[in-house]
Amino acid sequence: MEKVQAFQFTKYDIMSDTRRLSRRYGTIEAINKIGGEVILESAIEINVSDLESDFYGLTKIGFEPSNMAE
C-alpha cells in the first residue's frame, strides 16, 4: 500500500475567533489549499487511502493514527 506523510494543522475558527487544532490530518498541499497552518513536528506516515474523505488530501474527521492498520 502506498504511504504518504500527513500532518496535524491549525485553522481559524470563525465561531470562537481563534485558531484551533483540526480534528483531521492532511497533506501539506491540502492544508495549504484550505488556509491551514501545518504543524511540521506532527508528521506521520499513513496509507494514501486514509486521505479519501470529503476533501481529498485530508483524513476523515476524528482520524486517529493509533487506529491505522499495518
Image (spheres, helix red, strand yellow):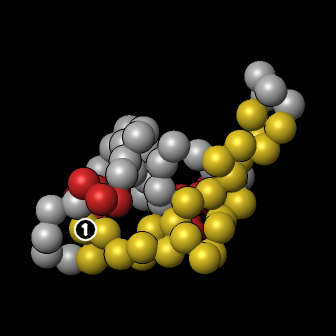
Q: Taking 16 as reference, is 1 above or below it?
A: below
50 sits to left or right of 8: left
Residues packed near mark 1 inside 10 Å, few (<14), some (14 to 19) or many (20 plus): some
- Residue 48, how many percent across, how many down? 27, 66
Pick the front one: 64 or 4: 64
- The reply to whether residue 56 is in sight is no
30 sits to left or right of 21: left
Q: Amino acid at mark 1?
A: Asn
Instruction: Please identify the residue farthest to the front as the structure is shown.
Output: 66
- Residue 16, how many percent across, how many down? 80, 26
- Residue 27, how many percent across, how many down? 49, 66
What residue is shown at x 65% (from left), y 67% (from top)? 39
Quadrant in the picture for residue 51: bottom left
Residue tagged 1? 47
Quarter of the N terminus within the rendering: bottom left
What residue is shown at x 78% (from left), y 44% (from top)? 19
Quadrant in the picture for residue 54: top left
Quadrant in the picture for residue 6: bottom left
- The reply to whether residue 33 is in sight is yes
Q: Taking 67 as reference, is 42 above or below it?
A: below
Instruction: Please identify the residue farthest to the right as the structure is shown.
Output: 17
What residue is shown at x 43% (from left), y 58% (from top)? 57
Tell me the element at label 1.
strand
- Residue 68, how many percent across, how many down? 23, 60
Quarter of the C terminus within the rendering: bottom left
Pick the front one: 21 or 12: 21
